[in-house]
Amino acid sequence: MAAPVILWLRRDLRLADQAALLAAMEEGPVVPVYVLDDETPKHRKMGGASRWWLHHSLKRLDESLQERGSRLILRRGACAEVLPKLAEEIRATQVHALHHYEPWWRNAEKAVAERLDLRLHDGNYLVPPGTIRTGSDGIYKIYTPFMKALWQHMPPAEPHDAPDHIAAPGTWPKSERLADWALLPTKPDWAKGFADWRPGEAGAARRLQAFEEHAEEYDEGRNLPSVEGSSRLSPHLHFGEVSAAQVWNRISSLSGDHNTYLKELVWRDYAQNIILAYPEYGKVNGKAQFDALPWRSEREASDDIAAWKEGRTGYPIVDAGMRQLWTTGWMHNRVRMIAASFLVKHLLVDWRVGDAWFWNTLVDADYASNSVNWQWVMGSGVDASMFVRIMAPLAQSAKFDAGEYIRQWVPELAGIPGVAIHDPDDHGCRPEDYPKKIIGHREARERALSAYKHIKA
């Protein structure tokens, strides 16, 4: 029998359209392994909501592997140390994995490659990050030309089906128990509201199928919080339970024009290209002039930050979004932009404070997408909205008809009829148990613009 081959899994927890798995199967019996590595990412180790998702995704993956004569090996520690030890145990020299582009994974890949024969494959994105280049062989900083260039390479190759059988080694190495990793919250169990999610490859397939039935409504519905017209595929894509190619090919095969949604998949690729070029994008402003912005300190703004996190700002659309986030681990995309803008511009709080909170509470927390999106809203990104474009939460709420969304997530306001739901204060019907606005829109706007004068060239 050929020597066993290690399949190193990270954010690619699927068996279909899994290039690393197919390549490993060609070499010999496969030992799939997931390493819970909190050491390599350091302060970027997975947050609580992501860990909840990971638990269930790994459980589903192991079940799928066992159906095919294989199993999932679990180990904990720094990948660069764990994988060579495992290889020595099973006398493997070769490791197959998909490319990952977060800076800590790139470092880990280099370290593993120094000790083992690491074969890296593409498959988590529409096009391998870094391969879409400008005419002068540079990286695209602006989304629109990047999108147009990438579009010329579409559609992606037809995805591969999951294998029916995966050859196993003669003897399996020891595996840690998933339950011992304590990825699920217990005291208290704050994830009870996550019950509607179905992590895993089968859950991703069901979610994709459900979205297909309503994809024609996406162009309008994605902006309407009360409709929730988005695909809700983001956590499945983040954990690699479905590939971007699978989603693209399924949606593009539908009748009608679905380019608006497909461009969101391109944005995901764009974000990966940005962190490939700027690995520190999650903590460094894309535009250096913003380093001098006079933020309120976290100590000075602590009460306001707490009110934002807990959905007690007095702005119904913001509060609804933050409560949805805490309860379900997810927030409607339009509301994410409103809530993020409120933190950085209305409250004048550093975007990195918000990014850290989203990192811990989102089931789809993604280094590239989160960093790029926060810096886009902030105005500090290499491609971003202008800082002086300050979202008006109350107007946004009315424009995008968020009344039922607010009534669902802010029960104190459930009985308020009509347009008054967007701004109960202005209509004189704010319930006593709902907080006053922590700052007025005009006051916040003037303060933000005044702060911006300090850095304006």
Image (cartoon, rainbow, N blue to C red):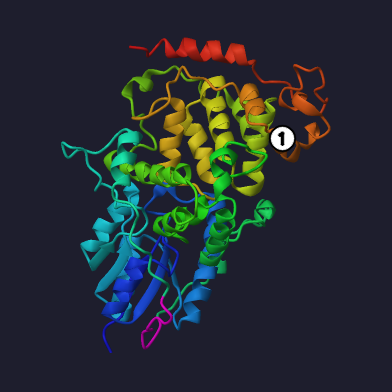
Q: Residue at x 65, y 15 (%)?
A: 440
Q: Eyeballing the image, is 4 above or below 114?
A: below
Residue 251 in view, yes or no: yes
Task: Depth check: give the residue in front, 281 or 300.
Answer: 281
Q: Which residue is mark 1?
A: 406
Q: Position of residue 135 (x, y in %)?
A: 18, 37
Name the residue furthest front: 255
Image-based side of 2 in relation to 16, left or right: left
Instruction: Place residue 280 in its image quadrant.
Output: top left
Task: Tell me if I can see residue 230 in this picture.
Answer: no
Q: Residue at x 51, y 65 (%)?
A: 201
Q: Position of residue 428 (x, y in %)?
A: 81, 17
Is 329 situated above or below 176? above
Q: Nearer the viewer, residue 148 or 122?
A: 148
Residue 197 x/y as whole percent: 62, 57
Could you tell whether 343 is left or right of 242 in the image? right
Q: Quadrant of the N terminus?
A: bottom left
Which amino acid lies under the numbered mark 1 shown in the image of this protein? Answer: Ile
User: Does residue 130 sit above or below 426 in this rendering?
Assistant: below
Mark 1 residue element: helix
Identify which residue is drawn at 46% across, 81% down. Answer: 68
From this view, report whether residue 337 is shown above or below residue 42: above
